[in-house]
Amino acid sequence: MVEPYFEVGVLDGGVRGLRLVGELDIGSVPVLLEAFSAGEGQAVLDVSELSFIDSSGIHALVDLAAQEDGNGPLILRGALPQIIRAFEIMKLGQNANLEIRSGSDGS
């Protein structure tokens, strides 16, 4: 069986954030948590290449957003419809600590 693919990269341009590629699930959450660092300024996660997210991934993002404490909401940039829908199903689409920007509004 092939392991799900997941990759984390640092965003360019002096933005405090990461680019997530592949599947964010119970197996890949530790990789995300290790790569994400607290810091000054608003954090951005480019999720435009995130093809799948399970409840473990969603909860990890919500927890990271809660840790931002005064830096503004954690921005999920470039979210595909299936990612947005997962947050809506779990009633997390209106979380004050999280700003979800669709793929068409991912800037």
Image: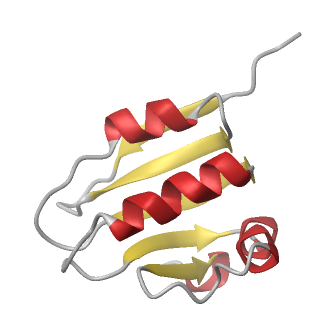
Q: Nearer the viewer, residue 56 or 36?
A: 56
Q: Is residue 47 left or right of 19 when viewed as pictured?
A: right
Q: Is residue 45 in sight in this rendering? A: yes
Q: Is residue 43 left or right of 6 when viewed as pictured?
A: left
Indicate the position of residue 32 as horizontal and vertical percent values. 45, 40
Q: Is residue 46 in sight in this rendering? A: no
Indicate the position of residue 25 as horizontal and vertical percent values. 68, 40
Count every numbered label the image shows and give the total. 0
In the image, residue 104 sits, relative to residue 11, either above or below, namely: below
The scheme the figure's colours follow is secondary structure
In the image, residue 95 sits, relative to residue 41, either above or below, namely: below
Q: Quadrant of the N terminus?
A: top right
Indicate the position of residue 35 as horizontal and vertical percent values. 34, 37
Please identify the residue farthest to the top as the structure is shown.
1
Q: Nearer the viewer, residue 97 or 3?
A: 97
Residue drawn at x 65%, y 83% is 93
Indicate the position of residue 61 as horizontal and vertical percent values. 50, 59
Q: Is residue 10 left or right of 28 when viewed as pictured?
A: left
Residue drawn at x 59%, y 32% is 28
Please identify the residue farthest to the right as the structure is shown.
1
In the image, residue 59 sits, relative to residue 27, either above or below, namely: below
Residue drawn at x 27%, y 68% is 68
Give residue 43's quadrant in the image: bottom left
Q: Quadrant of the C terminus?
A: bottom left
In the image, residue 42 sits, relative to residue 32, either above or below, namely: below
Residue drawn at x 45%, y 50% is 19
